[in-house]
Image (cartoon, rainbow, N blue to C red):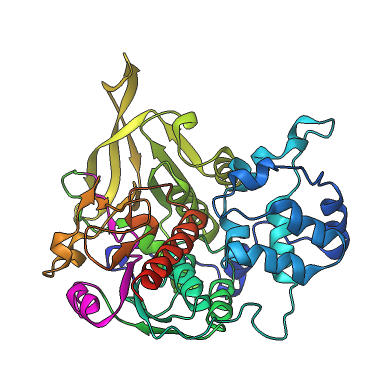
Amino acid sequence: MLEALKHVASTTSSDEQLQEKFTDLQPGLNRRQAAIESDRCLYCYDAPCTRVCPTEIDVPSFIQNIATGNINGAAKSILDQNILGASCARVCPTEILCEHACVRNHDAEGAPVRIGLLQRYALDHMHFPEHPFTRAAATGKKVAIVGAGPAGLSCAHQLARAGHDVVIFEAQPQSGGLNEYGIAKYKLVGETAQCEVDFLLQIGGISVRHGQALGKNLQLSDLQRDYDAVFLALGLGASRRLGLDHEDAPGIVAAVDYIAELRQADDLSRLPVPRQCIIIGAGNTAIDMAVQIARLGAEDVTLVYRRGAEDMSATAHEQSIAKENQVRILTWVQPQEVLLDAAGNVAGMRFEKTVVVDGNLKTTGETIELPAQAIFKAIGQSLNLASLQDTAAQHLQLEGGKIRVDEKYRTSLAKVYAGGDCIAAGQDLTVQAVQHGKLAALAINDDLKAKV
């Protein structure tokens, strides 16, 4: 249980009642709906939806396969570019990527083809008698991957396809990274993340060792010595701090920690649920936290951001989900002071109003106070530098607090590559991490072949 919330009572609802609130946010398409939706695609030449897809999925091609009833063909087309296409179909912000680029936004209908739901339909209904990809002839090369999240898993599968042997080292008890521990439960329901991992591993040549944390019981220098290449897919493990007094008081929790606890809980009714709570942040994690705590039974949920709603990194679609779940979004205020009760527990927070003057954010001196028994921080995460303390890791060059890589995902260390959220390039999206892993694997394969 979350120690910082041990003074907060659990919900009065039963686990069964709560589980009903964490079913799919949006139901999947049935066969008839998929057929109708796929017929709406114009199969554009040089399709803009494909051009904006971070993993370069040939969108018109897989949709045409669905239209002709070739579900396995559609699925393989997706998986060839994005082996984690099932989870990406659920969590990818299609509203700002492929569906935003769809030309049907500009015709008489004014609505895009529902590409995400069609991708989900293909992968939910595929049926291969065996894994759809086969390994190339064994190369005798061994590659170590640190992190079994989207980037690491994508890299591992691509390397296995090339005939290399891969060992993934993962700190957590289960594989999947954010898909398993960090995505809202109503987006990736049940065993979706683990089923996808199991499917990916069917290609063979990939082993996973859990409970292996870089900087603790795993050293980069040892991996450099024992493997032909190393891929770092560390993610971002350190939650950023507010920089306020009493920030470690009981009642203040990193949103990602609570979400992880929620996703792994056997009984949702045992989770601590404050009656009043504050979520600080502007991204999708803040929205995920706010919506989930509201669904668990919190009566008063306020998401606070220091700028305007239009500046939030959470999409308009995500913000609408929050509002539909009675989450209040309070903008133009920033945290000033944590308020405590007589026992030293969180009692609320004082905020100072903000305004933009000459392009710079300024405080006005006017304050407001919000009561709360819990405050959830969702202000982003940073690379856990404690994992980079061994002799080799200390020589990794960083850029903007993340690992610096070149265009081929090579780090400053020989044989060591990196990708996903731990590098500076791109957005912190699951689909972007998958692409990093895939491209890094292609670069590793080219470099290993060049050494033969």
Residue 266 in view: no
Q: In the orientation shown, which residue stands out farthest toward the left?
A: 391
Give the number of callouts: 0
Q: Left or right: 178 with respect to 200? A: left
Rendered view: 270 above or below 43 = below
Magenta stretch encompasses residue 236? yes
Which of the 4 image quarters holds residue 2? bottom left
Residue 333 in view: yes
Residue 416: x, y in percent? 28, 66
Residue 293: x, y in percent? 48, 56
Q: Left or right: 451 with respect to 310? A: left
Q: Which residues are magenta?
A: 214-242
Q: In the orientation shown, which residue stands out farthest toward the top?
A: 358
Q: Quadrant of the N terminus?
A: bottom left
Say which residue appears at 70% left-offset and 52% top-offset. Answer: 59
Residue 285: x, y in percent? 44, 52
Seen from the viewer's position, the closer of residues 258 and 276 is: 258
Seen from the viewer's position, the closer of residues 81 and 26 is: 81
Which of the 4 image quarters holds residue 139? bottom left
Rendered view: 31 above or below 214 = above
Magenta stretch encompasses residue 170? no
Seen from the viewer's position, the closer of residues 122 and 325 is: 122
Rendered view: 379 above or below 108 = below
Say which residue appears at 19% left-offset and 52% top-offset. Answer: 342
Seen from the viewer's position, the closer of residues 283 and 247 is: 283
Say which residue appears at 49% left-offset and 58% top-offset. Answer: 435
Say which residue appears at 57% left-offset and 48% top-offset. Answer: 93
Residue 123: x, y in percent? 69, 68
Q: Left or right: 122 with respect to 186? A: right
Which of the 4 image quarters holds residue 396? bottom left
Q: Quadrant of the C terminus?
A: bottom left
